[in-house]
Image (spheres, helix red, strand yellow):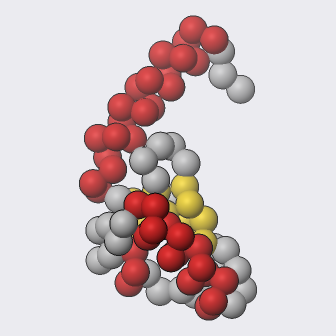
Amino acid sequence: MRVSEIELTGGEIRVATRTDAYRIFVGNRHNDQAWHRDNYIAEYGDVEVEYDSEYNVWRVPAFAEERAAYSASKAIDCANWGCE
């Protein structure tokens, strides 16, 4: 399944990015969420996604390696400088 195929329900839809952040498609109307979806696709492409029901988020397997590298780098910074 691709990002463009996610059903826009009017509820909050979370999709993973290349960092530890999520892009959230919000809005109570189809057009609001379509705007967020279209911007995500413009930035990251119409990537393959998998739904993670435990955390209620759409994961992007293609970003897994980048997310792991980002998290490892962030852990080093937190060890050096502290984290909130």
**From this viewpoint, is residue 29 visible?**
yes
Q: Position of residue 19 (x, y in %)?
A: 47, 43
Q: In percent of the image, x 66 and y 22: which residue is there?
A: 83
Q: Is residue 58 above or below residue 35?
A: above
Q: Quadrant of residue 27?
A: bottom right
Q: In percent of the image, x 42 and y 47: which residue is there?
A: 18
- Judge from the rendering whether residue 62 lies leftward or rightward of residue 42; answer left or right: left
Quarter holding the C terminus is: top right
Quarter holding the N terminus is: bottom left
Q: Is residue 57 above or below residue 46?
A: above
Residue 42 versus residue 53: which sits nearer the camera? Answer: 42
- The outermost residue toward the top is 80
- Judge from the rendering whether residue 82 lies leftward or rightward of residue 54; answer left or right: right
- Judge from the rendering whether residue 3 lies leftward or rightward of residue 74; answer left or right: left
Residue 5 versus residue 44: which sits nearer the camera? Answer: 44
Q: Position of residue 4 (x, y in %)?
A: 40, 81
Q: Position of residue 20 (x, y in %)?
A: 51, 43
Q: In percent of the image, x 29 and y 68: which residue is there?
A: 48
